[in-house]
Amino acid sequence: MVRDTEHELMGIIEDMLSVKEGRGPNGRVINEILDRNGNDPTRIVAILQCLQDRFGYLPREELYLISDLLGLPMNRIYHLATFFKAFKLTPPGRNTIKLCMGTACHVRGAGVIKDAIERYIGVSVGGTTADFRFSFETVRCLGCCGLAPVMTVGDTVHGKLEPSMIRKVLEKYR
Amino acid sequence: MRYTINGKKRTARGKMTVLEAARSAGIDIPSLCDNDYLEPYGACRLCVVEVREKGRKGWRVVASCLYPLKEGLEIRTDSKLILQHRKLLVELMLARCSGNRYVRRLAKRFGVKRPRFGGGDEDCIMCGLCVRVCSEIVGAAAIGFSSRGISRKVETPFGIDSSKCIACGACTYVCPTGAINMEYERVIELRKNEKEHMCRYTLMGFLDEAVCMLNYECARCEVDQRMRDRFDTHPAFAMHGRLRGAAAAGRVKRTGKKGVK
């Protein structure tokens, strides 16, 4: 019994120590991602995509780890991570609001909706609330212009919005 | 390899770019982002020329620093179209950096008076010399581009002080517009708490223990002044190809491909 606990403890310490070598808790994930991509620095974009799938964003520590393991300078990785809009460098909130700013929604007053959302959650487009409840971004077209102005929160679609509805809609999400 | 440049027939041997060929023919092509020690990059586009390949009819506008010289290539470096192109490019640069004296001097040379576009007050023209020097010559790879379009800029990863930077100043040396400057106060600060920062000359590999036993930034280093007197260029360039320090160990491997962005 005692030996088991000791064993477990040693394991934890070992894991903590070995993150840098790419063997720790996150290190293992990173190694798996890198192996899947053949440890190939030219596949860095695919690697970043895998990383974002796993964490929801690109965590800084892990990026440095990848930089070390691939021998790819951090300035190159940072260049790519900021070049593509799809990559996020900050953790997203639990609920992602995507407000459509396509032509139809724009005409039907998406701008006013945007202001209303910003007023309710207290952060502007591209931001995440301090309590990670919401992150807010705008997208071009959600493909349901009949519901304009429309937004999605997580996977749920909310259409025919009016500024006065925002509070009621967003209240439900914690 | 035979080629024609501005109507004159010439021959060349070996692989070279159109820019190199033109310069060997004594024809001046303006360029900002070109540097003998660095891979061609094609960012400033000032070196545009018109070329016509053998057996083709049309002339094409290409960046001469990236375009390889081919058998039977015809080149025009100062046609009306090319001069027009260059003038527009300089005008755009002036619109971006309306207050920068180097860009203004350039504009004067190209006869651009007032840009038709809105005046920005940037200093950087995004030629990428600093970024390339940092990774290709110094090997530190401390700075890079970030974002894109109008928000593109040169910075360290995440905009925080980079531990990779050895404060060598090569980026400030190559910058054609004086957009990057040394924060001398901070360098002095670094030297005050000596042991915190490795000596940049050691990191670049100029000095080893045989010459200087200290391997941290010293408050009073004579090498600093002597380097400047001796080389009359930045130490990193003077020692190009011979850098062997810790920084150079991380140097980006050359891919052999030209014009990798």
Image (cartoon, rainbow, N blue to C red):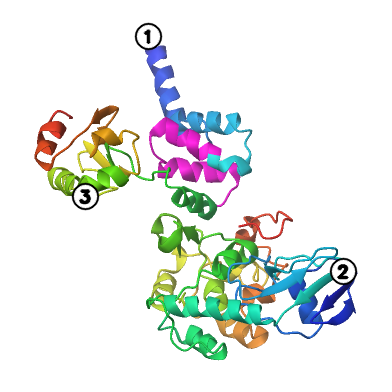
Badge 2 element: loop
Label pair 1/2, CB-CB below 8 angstroms? no
Q: Is residue B85 magenta?
A: no
Which of the labelled discs sits on residue B72, or is there none? 2
Measure the alpha-carbon separation of dots 2 and 3: 58 Å
Whether residues under marks 1 and 3 lie with C-beta atoms below 8 angstroms apart, the answer is: no
In the image: residue B210, left or right of residue B21: left
Quadrant where the C terminus of chain A sits is top left
Is label 2 on the same chain as label 3? no
Placement of A100 over or under B134, stated as above or below: above
Q: Is residue B212 visible?
A: yes
- The subunit letter for the residue under badge 1 reads A
Q: Residues within 10 Å of mark 1 (few under 14, many from 20)?
A: few
**Whether residue A95 is visible:** no
Query: How far across and how far down the image is residue B221, in percent?
Result: 53, 79
Residue located beneath label 3 in the image: A111
Q: Is residue A61 magenta?
A: yes
Residue B148 position within the rendered picture, expressed as x and y whole percent measured from the top left:
46, 57
Q: In the rendered view, would you say A77 is above or below B197? A: above
Magenta range: A46-73
What residue is drawn where x is 46% and y is 48%?
A84
Instruction: Report the number of discs.
Output: 3
Measuring from the top left, give residue A105's x and y in whole percent.
26, 43
Disc 1 target residue: A1
Secondary structure character of the magenta stretch overall: helix
